[in-house]
Image (spheres, rainbow, N blue to C red):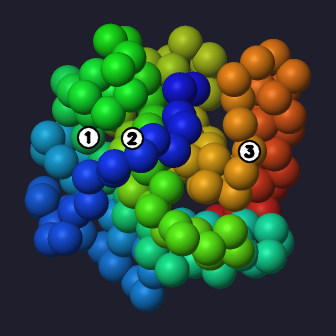
Amino acid sequence: MNSHPPVGPPHHETPPGDLHHEAPGIEFMVEDAPEFELSDAEELIGWIERVAEVHEHRIVQLTYIFCSDDYLHQLNVEYLDHDTLTDVITFDNSDDADMLEGDIFISVERVRENAQDLGISFRDELHRVMIHGVLHLLGYHDKDLLSQTAMRAKEDHCLSLRTF
């Protein structure tokens, strides 16, 4: 997963797509992925809030943007200078280390393909990628094998906190 907080992130002020679920601090949007539908938004919000609480952080604003490979690839090239496909890019907008504020862009196509390759459900892989972005905002990295292993363990722990 190629996700790290770049400088100068784009921020969506209004819902760009068909899907828009919002709670204080967390919202879900769709951009360029019309086939995608998030069915468990309320449960996801509760889970993400629990993860933040466990890590002693407060959510100011998290915006998830579910998009296509092409959309995320364009962001990857423009903001990170990486000409590759990726499943998630996290933009950190926080000014305070104890607060979570950012935009998490997720390629629905990458998540679907990764799930098939790993032999797991789309839902589980989507949740893993969603929390992967949050973990980056919490300060976890995945640049080398050791940090990737630690990140995977944190993802597994966070996934175990789901109650749905």
Q: Nearer the viewer, mark 3 or mark 1?
A: 3
Residue 145 sits in which quadrant? top right
Helix, strand or loop at mark 1: strand
State whether residue 47 appears in this view.
no
Secondary structure of the residue carrying numbered label 3: loop
Q: Out of 51 and 103, give the one closest to the viewer.
A: 103
Type of the residue with mark 2 = Ile
Q: CA distance from mark 3 to mark 2?
A: 18 Å
The residue drawn where x is 43% and y is 87% is 24
Residue labelled with disc 2: 106
Quarter of the image with the N terminus in it: top right
| Residue 3 visible | yes
From the top left corner, tell me how far across and down residue 140 is, in percent: 74, 45
Disc 3 to disc 2: CB gap under 8 Å = no
User: Mark number for residue 25?
Assistant: none
- Please state the horizontal and vertical placement of residue 47, each as a whole percent of the image: 64, 69
Q: Quadrant of residue 51?
A: bottom right
In the image, what residue type sits under mark 1?
Answer: Cys
Front-most of residues 130 and 135: 135
- Image coordinates for residue 146, horizontal then vertical, percent: 87, 22
Which residue lies under the disc numbered 3? 140
* Residue 67: mark in rendering: 1
- Alpha-carbon neighbours of circle 3 within 10 Å: few (<14), some, or many (≥20)? some
- Image quadrant holding the C terminus, namely bottom right
Mark whose residue sits in front, 3 or 2: 3
Question: Which secondary structure lies at badge 2?
Answer: strand
Total residue callouts: 3
Residue at 69% x, 23% y is 143
**Mark 2 Cα within 10 Å, few/some/many (few <14, many 20+)?**
many
Mark-to-mark CA distance, 1 and 2: 6 Å
**Residue 78 falls left or right of residue 93:** left
> Which comes before the other along the chain, label 3 or label 2?
2
